[in-house]
Image (tube, grey):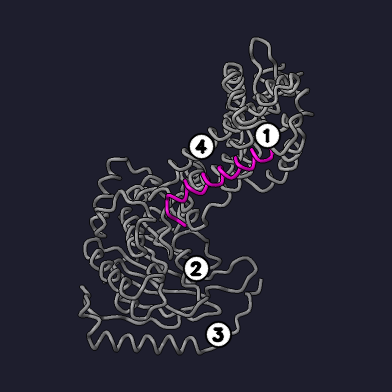
């Protein structure tokens, strides 16, 4: 018997004001420990799905359950890594990592100890006193990840965190992210435009279609963890990348269904 | 051109040219008209001769300028926070703030005298009036221009309104605040001198540089008048330098405008 799902989308729909439907009847469940990548054409609602999970925006229809509660009530169980590092430029690295802990009322001593631990985890222990502008793009993103991990989240939401980085840095950070995950098995939702990245990181990939955003297909990634540089050279990995790419191309080529606003 | 020596050489060269031009004009004038532009040497002599009176007047003006400037910082900061809370508040209050700024100091001076009496209080109050507008406008702009991603980060972690204000919006507004502070530091001594001319008091040796300028003008002591103008200018430079140093100390680690000085 499988464990209770950590996240359940029960026919979730989302519409902003009177605008068109952004997400249409999304239904799936994430088990604890899943690493789920959301991939799809621009405007398919990948980031919107993350925002719903984070409680930053309410669902329009259906029900969204995180750890048995509404996303808003489950806020303490999740952390978010944005597309941009979103570091406070006037604070040094250590103080940046402390911000969410501080907002949650974590005592100063605990904050300092946690910050040291997560900085070592992302191999930036020696940069604790540096200011964001003294860091490279990759280092900034590692600080952003460390800040999220400092909250020991059950659910980690990552919205295209490596999208602005060069290919080499992105691959290194992918490997680092999985290595960190070996030590604390959070459940992850990862938005990306990179098929290779999605296959390398995830055990499940949701390919979304656009206008309105909906699940087109779920693809399991049965590659064993831990995954390393060698994984990228394996035949299974390359075949999965090809499969996901084909599915993604078919989604991008297909026109969306005509979805009218629901009758009152 | 970016060599550090140029930063000293260029202003020095410009200064030498101005001095040469100054002496040129002075000696071009007929002997009876030379009082219009005393030589730098004559002005220096006047400095020495009137040093006691000028020092006392500078101290009096500086007190008024600093009191008004300090009051402007406190009031404008509180007002900026209020204005940043909603666009409705801004729309309601901005016209009145602008009206206050647009009223000339010589017109406000007699009103201040009626309210708080002639002398230091009036000078400080008038300096406040002239200095607080750039501060409040810039600080408000800073408070409402916080990076949306950072606001979202704070929303995600359910920051309270106060946490968002003091941990995010206020620090993020500091570069704007310092821009306003630099403008205010430039105009505060000017405001204090004008206020001193219109609402100052010489009772008990309380006259400032504005008062001193009126006296030297009436006595036709033109080199001393120029020395007074130079002292006023110097006061402005000192206040500006203090603000710049404070801005550099506060922003050097993270703001691009102060990056070069940091390295």
Disc 3 from disc 4: Cα separation: 63 Å
* 1 or 2: mark nearer the eye: 1
A254 above or below B245? below
Disc 1 from disc 2: Cα separation: 48 Å
Q: Which mark is residue B184?
A: none
Q: Which residue is mark 1?
A: B130
Disc 3 from disc 2: Cα separation: 18 Å
| Chain letter belonging to callout 2 | A
Q: Residue at x 54, y 42 (%)?
A: B178
To which quarter of the image does residue A32 belong?
bottom left
Disc 3 from disc 1: Cα separation: 61 Å
Disc 2 from disc 4: Cα separation: 49 Å
Disc 1 from disc 4: Cα separation: 19 Å
Q: Nearer the viewer, residue B88 or A169?
A: A169
A217 above or below A31? below
User: Is residue A89 among what the camera can see?
Assistant: no
Q: Secondary structure at mark 3?
A: loop
Q: Which residue is mark 2?
A: A48
Q: Residue at x 35, y 82 (%)?
A: A219
Do the dots labelled 1 and 4 sit on one chain? yes
| Chain letter belonging to callout 3 | A
> Which sits earlier in the primary sequence, circle 3 or circle 2?
2
Task: Tell me if residue A10 is in the magenta stretch.
Answer: no
Q: Tell me which segment is drawn in magenta.
A: B1-26
Do the dots labelled 3 and 1 sit on one chain? no
Mark 3 near mark 2, Cβ–Cβ under 8 Å?
Answer: no
B24 above or below A87? above
């Amino acid at each position: 018997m499988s464990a209770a799902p950590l996240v359940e989308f029960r026919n979730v729909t989302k519409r902003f004001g009177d605008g068109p439907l952004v997400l249409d009847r999304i239904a799936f469940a994430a088990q604890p420990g899943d690493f789920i990548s959301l991939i799809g054409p621009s405007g398919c609602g990948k980031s919107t799905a993350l925002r719903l999970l984070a409680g930053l925006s309410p669902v329009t229809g259906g029900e969204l359950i995180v750890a048995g509660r509404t996303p808003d009530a489950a806020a303490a169980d999740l952390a978010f890594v944005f597309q941009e590092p979103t570091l406070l430029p006037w604070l040094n690295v250590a103080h940046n990592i402390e911000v969410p802990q501080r907002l949650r009322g974590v005592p100063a001593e605990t904050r300092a100890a946690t910050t040291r631990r997560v900085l070592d985890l992302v191999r930036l222990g020696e940069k604790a006193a540096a200011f964001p502008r003294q860091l490279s793009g990759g280092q900034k993103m590692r600080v952003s990840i460390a800040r999220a991990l400092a909250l020991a989240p059950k659910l980690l939401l990552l919205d295209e965190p490596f999208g602005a980085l060069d290919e080499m840095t992105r691959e290194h950070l992918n490997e680092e992210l999985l290595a960190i995950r070996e030590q604390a098995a959070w459940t992850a939702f990862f938005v990306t435009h990179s098929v290779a990245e999605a296959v390398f990181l995830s055990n499940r990939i949701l390919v979304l279609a656009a206008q309105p955003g909906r699940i087109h297909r779920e693809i399991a990634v049965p590659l064993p963890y831990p995954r390393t540089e060698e994984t990228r050279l394996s035949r299974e990995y390359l075949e999965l990348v090809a499969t996901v790419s084909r599915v993604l191309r078919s989604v991008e080529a297909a026109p969306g269904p005509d979805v009218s606003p629901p009758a009152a | 051109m970016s060599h550090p020596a140029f930063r000293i050489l260029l202003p020095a060269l410009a200064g030498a040219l101005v001095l040469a031009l100054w002496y040129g004009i002075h000696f071009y004038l007929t002997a009876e008209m030379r009082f219009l532009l005393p030589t730098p040497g004559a002005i220096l002599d006047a400095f020495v001769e009137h040093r006691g009176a000028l020092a006392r007047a500078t101290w009096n003006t500086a007190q008024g300028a600093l009191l008004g400037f300090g009051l402007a910082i406190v009031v404008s900061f509180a007002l900026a926070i209020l204005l940043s809370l909603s666009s409705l508040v801004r729309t309601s209050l901005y016209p009145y703030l602008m009206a206050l700024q647009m009223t000339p100091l010589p017109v406000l001076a007699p009103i201040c005298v009626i309210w708080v009496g002639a002398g230091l209080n009036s000078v400080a109050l008038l300096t406040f009036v002239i200095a607080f507008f750039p501060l409040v406008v810039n600080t408000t702009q800073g408070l409402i221009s916080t990076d949306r991603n950072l606001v979202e980060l704070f929303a995600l972690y359910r920051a309270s309104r106060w946490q968002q204000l003091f941990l995010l919006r206020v620090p993020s507004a500091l570069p704007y605040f310092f821009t306003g502070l630099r403008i205010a530091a430039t105009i505060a001594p000017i405001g204090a001198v004008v206020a001193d001319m219109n609402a100052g008091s010489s009772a008990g040796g309380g006259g400032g540089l504005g008062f001193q300028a009126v006296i030297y003008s009436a006595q036709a002591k033109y080199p001393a008048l120029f020395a007074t103008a130079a002292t006023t200018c110097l006061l402005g430079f000192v206040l500006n330098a203090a603000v710049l140093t404070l801005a550099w100390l506060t922003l050097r680690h993270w703001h691009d405008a102060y990056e070069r000085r940091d390295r």
